Image (cartoon, rainbow, N blue to C red):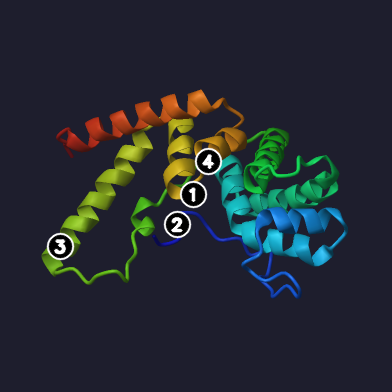
């Protein structure tokens, strides 16, 4: 499946090769090495999760600049808190909870209402096929209809849909990022999908 491209990319970090920690090394191994003071191991964790952290922060803050700062601050705080990280626990949900907390603090301190930009059309792999002109016109209309329908959802439902389907976060990760119970994620997701079906199937005028 293609990487989601409906949110801006982070420009604050550069991917780099990490000597001694090949890409196949598991998160558990990297966390354990980082806890023992191996800087390269934590660098690899940063490389793996920079984009996810940035995009999660962007969903909450609505600002690319704020999201980059949030991601950087979250990685610093996560590094400082490694001694309290429970061995064997998954790293990504733990990191995204820190990202979510930082993003909400940033949003509150700025006094802004979070903005959510969904570009569901870009979630498609443009290189997967070359449609006919008729097919391209139909696909374009479908994307416009979906964007319109997404825009009709309440913010809280749009954020859940974005986390689950655009960022492809798990229910646990979505709950941690948005600071809501997992049951709330599931209920908002169900309501959002039901509403999207209604909107997509209903005739539109104008």
Sequence order check, earlier mark of 4 and 3: 4
Helix, strand or loop at disc 4? loop
Residue picked out by circle 2:
4
The reply to whether callout 4 and callout 2 are in contact (CB within 8 Å) is no
Residue picked out by circle 3:
135
Helix, strand or loop at disc 1? loop
Q: Is residue 121 left or right of residue 178?
A: left
Snapshot quadrant of residue 59: top right
Q: Nearer the viewer, mark 2 or mark 3?
A: 2
Q: Is residue 107 left or right of residue 182?
A: right
Helix, strand or loop at disc 2? loop
Residue 113, visible in the rendered structure: no
Cα distance in 3D space between marks 1 and 4:
16 Å
Helix, strand or loop at disc 3? helix
Q: Nearer the viewer, mark 4 or mark 2?
A: 2
Identify the residue at image location x=39%, y=60%.
1
Snapshot quadrant of residue 165: top left
Sequence order check, earlier mark of 1 and 4: 4
The numbered disc on residue 167 is 1
Residue picked out by circle 4:
115
The reply to whether callout 1 and callout 2 are in contact (CB within 8 Å) is yes
């Amino acid at each position: 499946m293609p990487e989601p491209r409906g949110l801006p990319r982070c420009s604050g970090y550069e991917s780099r090769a990490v000597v001694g920690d090949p890409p196949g090394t598991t998160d558990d191994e990297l966390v354990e090495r980082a806890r023992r003071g191996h800087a390269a191991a934590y660098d690899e964790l940063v490389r793996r999760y920079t984009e996810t952290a940035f995009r999660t922060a962007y969903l909450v803050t609505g600002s690319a600049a704020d999201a980059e700062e949030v991601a950087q601050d979250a990685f610093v705080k996560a590094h400082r808190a490694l001694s309290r990280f429970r061995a064997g626990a998954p790293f990504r949900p733990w990191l995204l909870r820190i990202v979510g907390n930082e993003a909400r603090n940033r949003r509150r301190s700025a006094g802004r209402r979070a903005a959510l930009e969904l570009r569901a059309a870009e979630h498609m792999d443009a290189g997967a096929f070359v449609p006919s002109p008729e097919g391209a016109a139909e696909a374009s209309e479908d994307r416009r209809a979906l964007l319109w329908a997404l825009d009709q959802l309440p913010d809280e439902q749009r954020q859940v849909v974005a986390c689950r389907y655009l960022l492809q976060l798990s229910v646990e990760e979505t709950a941690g990022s948005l600071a809501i119970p997992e049951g709330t994620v599931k209920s908002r997701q169900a309501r959002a999908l039901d509403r999207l079906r209604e909107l997509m199937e209903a005739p539109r005028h104008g």
